[in-house]
């Protein structure tokens, strides 16, 4: 939460805004990746952030789940 306060303060003062990148390496994470991404997206909704999901050849349905649910979300890069 502190980083958001700092960014909002910089924005008010005309300062440079940092972009936050959240990197998530995942392998066979079908059971929990949706909950994780949804929680992060809820928290960064109005902030300059990106989520980089590094999918490492999962043998479950992680890839399909990510592509079906998050491919069109501009904050999520798969």
Image (cartoon, rainbow, N blue to C red):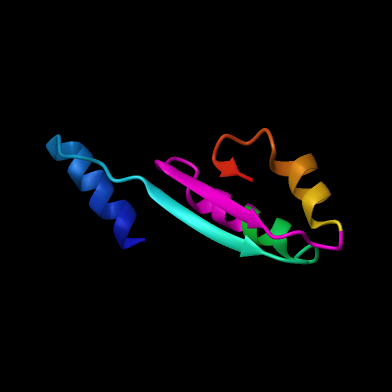
Residue 11 pos. (x, y %) = 22, 38
Residue 42: x and y in percent read: 56, 50
Tell me the residue at 13%/39% (across/down). Answer: 13
Residue 56: image quadrant is: bottom right
* Of the pair 57 and 12, the residue shown nearer to us: 57
Farthest right residue in view: 60
Q: Residue at x 48, y 45 (%)?
A: 50
Determine the residue positioned at 61% across, 63% down. Answer: 25
Q: Is residue 50 above or below residue 2?
A: above
Residue under the image location 55 percent in, 50 percent down = 52
Numbered marks: total: 0
Residue at the limit of the structure toward the front, as seen here: 57
In this rendering, position of residue 73 left or right of residue 17 = right
**Residue 15 among magenta residues:** no
Give the x, y percent position of residue 24: 57, 60
Q: Is residue 43 magenta?
A: yes
Q: Is residue 32 above or below residue 9?
A: below
Q: Which residues are magenta?
A: 38-60
User: Splitting the image into 4 quarters, where does residue 72 fall?
Assistant: top right
Residue 49 x/y as whole percent: 44, 45
> Which is nearer the eye, 28 or 38?
28
Residue 64, above or below 23: above
In the picture, the quarter occupied by the N terminus is bottom left
């Amino acid at each position: 939460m502190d980083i958001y306060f700092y960014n909002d303060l910089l924005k008010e003062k005309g300062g440079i805004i940092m972009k936050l990148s959240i990197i998530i390496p995942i392998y066979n994470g079908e059971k929990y990746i949706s909950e994780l991404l949804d929680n992060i997206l809820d928290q960064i909704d109005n902030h300059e952030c990106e989520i980089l999901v590094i999918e490492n050849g999962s043998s479950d349905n992680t890839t399909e789940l990510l592509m079906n649910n998050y491919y069109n979300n501009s904050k999520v890069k798969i």
